[in-house]
Image (spheres, rainbow, N blue to C red):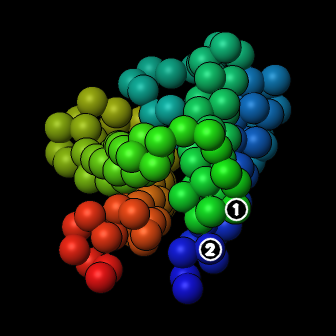
Amino acid sequence: MLAPILSVVLAVILSIAGLMHALWGFGVTFPAANEQQLARMVVGKRGITKMPSMTACLFVSASLFAFAFLALVLGRYVAVPVSKWLIAAAGAGAALAFMGRGVLGVLPAFERALPEQPFLSLNRRFYSPLIFLIGVGFALLTLALPYWSWRLGLLH
């Protein structure tokens, strides 16, 4: 089925994002020329001149790696000794969180709060759609779980 492939695709995308955030935490400014340009690209807060702290970047990095791991769990590449319902709930929570951020990221109120360019255009074109699709991926993986699908009456 497609669930194992989707699981790996999500894990790769989230791991790359996690690696980028870790590198930024250690001062790497790729793909920008300097820290101020990077902050304007990836944070977008009005008047920003510096990237968030190393701690903040590493926290986001660790969170993204945790979501990558969850994608592998949902794809049944990794077995964890927890309730199947907890795994399903984590998948549903990840789906809602990512889809919510994807939708919120294109709302006018969000855009008014973070007016810096190039973040605003990058968010509209790339960040929010990708984040929303990651959420859809988590939703599909969660619904593809045999025990979850059976409970919803999707499998007999």
Residue where numbered disc 2 is placed: 4
Instruction: Locate residue 40 relative to residue 26 in the image: left or right.
Output: left
Report the disc number at residue 61: none
Check if mark 2's residue and mark 1's residue have beta carbons within 8 Å. Answer: yes
Residue 52 showing in the rendered view:
yes
The residue sitting at 59% across, 33% down in the picture is 63
- Quarter of the picture containing the N terminus is bottom right
Q: Nearer the viewer, residue 10 or 1?
A: 1
Q: CA distance from mark 2 to mark 1?
A: 8 Å
Q: SS for tag 1?
A: loop
Amino acid type indicated by mark 2: Pro
Instruction: Locate residue 74 relative to residue 88 in the image: left or right.
Output: right
Q: Looking at the picture, how far across and down is residue 117, in whole percent?
A: 45, 43
The residue sitting at 62% across, 63% down in the picture is 76
The residue sitting at 39% across, 24% down in the picture is 46
Residue 132 showing in the rendered view:
no
Amino acid type indicated by mark 1: Tyr
Report the disc number at residue 77: 1
Q: Is residue 62 above or below residue 120?
A: above
Q: Nearer the viewer, residue 69 or 120?
A: 69
Instruction: Locate residue 16 relative to residue 64 in the image: left or right.
Output: right
